[in-house]
Amino acid sequence: MKNLEWIDWLVLILTLIIIIGYGTWKTRSNTNVTDYLKGGNTTKWWTIGLSVMATQASAITFLSTPGQAFNDGMGFIQFYFGLPVAMIIICLVFIPLYHRLKVYTAYEFLEERFDLKTRTLTAILFLIQRGLSAGITIFAPAIILSVVLGWNLTLLNIFIGVMVIFYTVSGGTKAVNVTQKHQMIIIFVGLLIAFFIIVSKLPQDLTFLQAIDIAGASGKMDILDFSFDLNNRYTVWSGLIGGTFLMLSYFGTDQSQVQRYLSGKSLKEMQLGLIFNGILKIPMQFFILLIGVMVFVFYQFNQSPVNFNPNANNLVLNSNYAHAYKSLQANKDKLFIEKQSVINLYTKQKSLGAKADIASLNKQDSEIRNKAKQLIDKAALDYDVKIESNDKDYVFIHFILNNLPRGIIGLLLAVILSAAMSSTASELNALGATTTIDLYKRFSKNKTELQLVKASKWFTLSWGVIAIAVACVANLAENLIQLVNIIGSIFYGNVLGIFLLAFFIKSIHGHAVFIAAILTQIMVICLFVLDQYQIINLPFLWLNFVGCVIVIFNAYIIQFIFNDDKKTTH
Amino acid sequence: MKTSKPNQPKKKYQWNGMYTLVILVNLIYIITFYMISNYYNNL
């Protein structure tokens, strides 16, 4: 467990207070719904772009992604290959329609196209999945920081939640956008500093390209996988096909993103904001993964623990498996010394033999780490406690706390908390807006602007409290970034299918879509459960695609069976 | 001198040069990744 020094506390607290204080002060007066929920339609394209990126990049992105690269290399980048395609489709089809209809939420459009019940169902599906995700967005960094810094988990959950509630309720969409812009700047600066410090901490005679060579020899630079194997979670095909569907539903139909670009000054500014994301997203993710690869190279020259999760280490060292665990650490240390001479040889000669030796030593290293994980799982079973033996999420924070200079540690913690807050803020803002516009305003008549703003504030506050509650009861998952993606994948495909029917297939009417959507949601959940029990093999990323196809197919069949050709649009 | 065509129907989806740019830039990224993967596989 690491204690922060005063300089870290100072940097951390000052960074958070300045960003949140400025955002709240700048956006303190909101008198009508357009101001509160659409930021008065004054947002410029670069703010939209940064806001969209900040919403997607949660703290999990900065904690988990470098760990992902540390373990499995750069292949995770393929997950984002569908994003630029999705950005273009949204700019071409979705935004012009949302803009023309002057909607506040994406679901309002569904009533124009289908009927009230389809709009309400889709809004409720969004509220369920986003309400749960908002809790996880708070919980994910909180659990990691509480483990490595010894902070109280519940208090940290409450702290992150309350800070976000404070400025999101006060300033609405404008406050979310303004703070996100500054949060993203701090995130970029923090990551750049971290990257240069890692590179500077490598041996003096090692060039950057030689460092990459070492990573390449260990298989960390195998970026693209063209195989059609469904067991490989990240391939070019799953990224391009599954990723396009996931990103299309996330950016096109998820109110937490839609609300970011609906606040744009004009149609052009909204589209440019997404173009900005389409061009910068992949390099940004590449850079975060590269940080993970550099951390991997750093630990080729510096000793590392057999597991990066300090709680897991403590548990197993106080169990019957302590002896076996210590001998694994001793083996790993021996391997480390062997590696030094092989790496030296490889950087000088680049011989095939040395490359094979590095690969073999790193394979042995992974085997030791896997055995350690098994011991941790056994110890957890014996003591009947839940502990995360998969330490991907702890790699980067372990590096930060043990190797970065004082003050910079505070800045990097501010980066992690800023990322957590920026994503949560968009989620609460969108949950508040959807509840107000699609449920409260739609089902209660004659509400004044002021009453609607007040209601929005109360709904945002309530969702904030729910998110904190979810964060406080959230259980451990294998990998936190995946849990958020799994929840998304279960609902997104269905919602995207409804929107695609609305945009492109004029012959389908509201009644058929409504029944198809309910049936599809049940079917997708069944498919997910069957995969969990290993009865079928369907990685969660494909649920987006499957859900989307099923709802379109179901809608056609239902319309055909009931011969539902009466128009149900208003 | 250019002549205007007032009766020409407006296209449903307006393609924009920026979209071509997004495709080109991302293709360059993917080709670069392919070259990096290939280089380290054949080293």
Image (spheres, coloured by chain):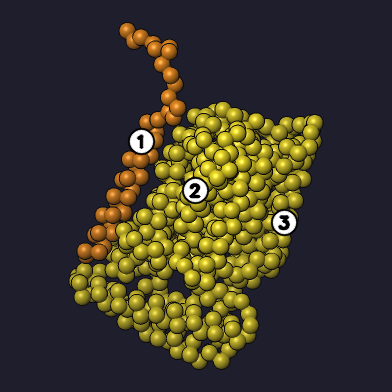
Q: Is residue A315 left or right of residue A225?
A: right
* Secondary structure under the numbered disc 1 in the rendered image: helix
* Chain containing mark 3: A
Mark 1 lies on residue? B20
Quadrant (top left, top right, bottom left, bottom right) of the N terminus of chain A: bottom right
The quadrant holding residue B33 is bottom left
The chain in orange: B
Depth check: give the residue in front, A177 or A496.
Answer: A496
Quadrant (top left, top right, bottom left, bottom right) of the C terminus of chain A: top right
* Secondary structure under the numbered disc 2 in the rendered image: helix
Q: Amino acid at mark 1?
A: Thr
Whether residue A317 is visible to the viewer of this picture, yes or no, is: yes
How far apart in space, not on screen, are marks 3 and 2 (Cα)?
35 Å
Q: Is residue A86 left or right of residue A377?
A: left
Q: Is residue A433 above or below residue A308?
A: above
Q: Is residue A33 above or below residue A181?
A: above
Residue A415 bears which disc, if any?
none
How far apart in space, not on screen, are marks 1 and 2 (Cα)?
32 Å
Cβ–Cβ under 8 Å for marks 1 and 2: no
Disc 3 with disc 1 on a shared chain: no
Disc 1 with disc 2 on a shared chain: no
Q: Amino acid at mark 3?
A: Ile
Residue A553 bears which disc, if any?
2
Q: Position of residue B26 (x, y in %)?
A: 35, 45
* Chain containing mark 1: B
Q: Is residue A360 left or right of residue A153?
A: left
* Secondary structure under the numbered disc 3 in the rendered image: helix
- Colour assignment, chain A: yellow
- Look at 20% across and 75% down and name the residue there: A353
* Chain containing mark 2: A
Mark 3 lies on residue? A466
